[in-house]
Image (cartoon, grey):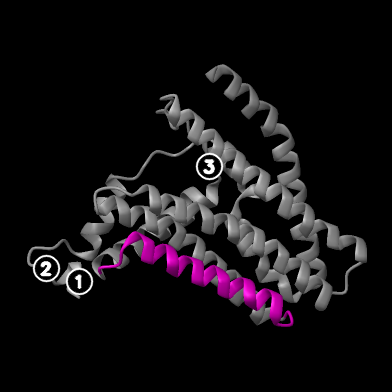
Amino acid sequence: MTTTSERPGAPTYWETVAQLAAAQKGRAAGAPAYSVFVNRPAGRLLAAAAHRAGLSPNQVTGISAGCSAAGILVLALVAPTMWSGVLVAFLLALGYALDSADGQVARLRGGGSAAGEWLDHVIDCAKISLLHIAVLVAAARFLDVPQTWLLVPLAFLALDNVAFFTIILNDSLKQIRGVPLRRPGQFRPMRSVVLLAVDYGVVCLSFVLLGWTEAFVLVYTLLCTALAGHTALALPKWFNDMRRLG
């Protein structure tokens, strides 16, 4: 297979990164800081490397799924230690960065496909579901926690799925009616920082604490509580947005 970097006159790696930065889609008003300032730039670097290696967007999606699956399996099957926690966090964060990279690879190729977007969303849904199931399994097998705490990953699972599905549905309904998803000047940095508490990237990093049960349980519970509060506030607002669409 001839890679992009082997073609005469092909842009250098950093030229490809710059091209991606220039073509970057706008920031949504509700985009959390980790996703905007860490994950998207990391995805850009990975996308440039993947594009130069000749990988397709779907192949990048597959690698992303593999990294996330590996992290989830380590979480569920390996007794928690400082190092297993770091490994889980790294694999999940890498999978998340590659999840950003697949769309950027598609952009370099002239645009994505419906099948690619479908695959991306299906894997995202599986990932967020299996992650909290793995926390439940790990807690039941390895962690010294009260039985009642096992309800926390179940609540996190339900909240994450409701929020994920609703956001995707909101965007789909807006697109059908020709409403722009992002408007100039809409992004607010302070709001982005506040929303760190409900950022999937922060959930990934929380597993660094896995070797310290009390710290991990506290942080994971706080993240679940933050998502519950955000979802409770956001759902009425999103419903009113849909009512205005007609």
Answer with left or right where residue 110 lies relative to residue 25: left
Provide residue 46's location: percent of width, then percent of height.
37, 64
Q: CA distance from mark 3 to mark 2?
A: 37 Å
The answer to which image quadrant residue 162 occupies is top right
Identify residue for label 2. Answer: 7
The quadrant in which the C terminus is found is: top right
Relative to 92, does residue 119 appear above or below in the rendering?
above
Residue shown at 57% from the left, 39% from the top: 167
Identify residue for label 1. Answer: 3
| Amino acid type, residue under disc 2 in the picture | Arg
- Point out which mark residue 31 bears: 3
Q: Nearer the viewer, mark 3 or mark 1?
A: 1
- Label 3–label 2 contact, CB within 8 A: no
Relative to 68, does residue 142 appear above or below in the rendering?
below
- Label 3–label 1 contact, CB within 8 A: no
Q: Which residues are magenta?
A: 54-80
Callout 3 environment at 10 Å: few (<14), some (14 to 19), or many (20+)?
many
| Main secondary structure along the magenta-highlighted residues | helix
Residue shown at 60% from the left, 50% from the top: 199
| Amino acid type, residue under disc 3 in the picture | Ala
Answer with left or right where residue 236 lies relative to residue 13: right
Callout 1 environment at 10 Å: few (<14), some (14 to 19), or many (20+)?
few
Provide residue 241's location: percent of width, then percent of height.
58, 23
Mark 3 or mark 2, which has the lower sequence index? 2
Q: CA distance from mark 3 to mark 1?
A: 34 Å
Relative to 142, does residue 185 appear above or below in the rendering?
above
